[in-house]
Amino acid sequence: MANKRYKASLELIESGKFYDPAEAMALVCQTAKAKFDETVELHVRLGVDSRHADQQVRGAVVLPNGTGKTVRTLVFCKENLYEAAKAAGADYFGGADYVEKITKENWFEFDVVIATPDMMGVIGRLGKILGPKGLMPNPKAGTVTMDVARAVSEAKAGKIEYRLDKTNIIHCPIGKVSFGADKLGENFDTLMGAIIKAKPAAAKGQYIKSCVIASTMGPGIKINSAKLGN
């Protein structure tokens, strides 16, 4: 059944065609045939080499329409900031007790980890656990900060982190199919704007090699990257 749906979706896409972003957003909503509200993901291949420190592309941006996902936050801070974290809506906050919980109980009931700079020593041994999952707090992503209230609020509002994987591709959610083409387009523009702005000075040649969007169960839709600014 799923295969049948996928084939039907595929027929809506012109083979080899590169779509303008607005067309692509409308099409991704049409090709999402699953019985649940599918997530729309953006996959951008960049003309950089992530093995070189001066060609890293990483940062964070708040999507204007959020991600459609409920974000659970864990804050590592000293007791004097517990109230601020709680008031901003943090789901969990504490110190060494959560390090123990993660290492001993394999506990991962959170989506974003925020830490104050003075707590990085405490959570240092979580690097090998959180790092591979992309959950380790990082100053570039705004998740290592003394302003925990702001970091929590932004995470809840739909702040996402973008970073290159080993194959020089950025994978990011830009919302749910139920958002509709216009809201997905606004999120797409915001994320692509941030990625383009983050272009390393050392990057040579074409920066955006390819750009594809797809819903969770749907086929990939190629976007005309020539119009996105290189």
Image (tube, rainbow, N blue to C red):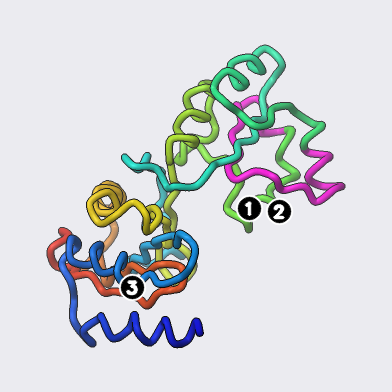
Distance from disc 3 to disc 2, alpha carbons, whole Å, reads: 38 Å
- Identify the residue at horizontal 42%, vertical 47% (top origin): 67
Q: Is residue 101 visible?
A: yes
Among the 4 quarters of the image, the one containing residue 171: bottom left
Residue 128 image label: 2
Foreground mark, 3 or 1? 3
- Above-or-below relation of 151 to 37: above
Residue span colored magenta = 99-121
Left or right, residue 6 beside residue 203 = right
Q: Is residue 49 above or below residue 12?
A: above
Q: Quick one: label 2, few (<14), some, or many (20+) residues within 10 Å?
A: few
Q: First in sequence: mark 3 or mark 1?
A: 3
Q: Are discs 2 and 1 less than 8 Å apart at CB?
A: yes
Count of marks, rendered view:
3
Q: Position of residue 77 (x, y in %)?
A: 66, 24
Badge 1 density bin: few <14, some 14–19, many ≥20, Cα 10 Å: few
Find out whether residue 108 is within the magenta segment: yes
Residue that protrudes farthest toward the left in the picture = 227
- Position above or below: 185 against 1: above
Q: Is residue 60 magenta?
A: no
The reply, left or right, for residue 200 in relation to residue 134 is: left
Identify the residue position indicated by label 3 in the image: 31
Disc 3 to disc 1, C-alpha distance? 34 Å
Task: Look at label 2 and name its amino acid.
Answer: Lys
Nearer to us in this view, 167 or 112: 112
Residue drawn at (33%, 73%), measured in percent from left and top?
31
Residue picked out by circle 1: 131
Residue flagged by tag 1: what amino acid is it?
Answer: Gly
Q: Element at badge 3? A: helix
- The answer to whether residue 205 is visible is no
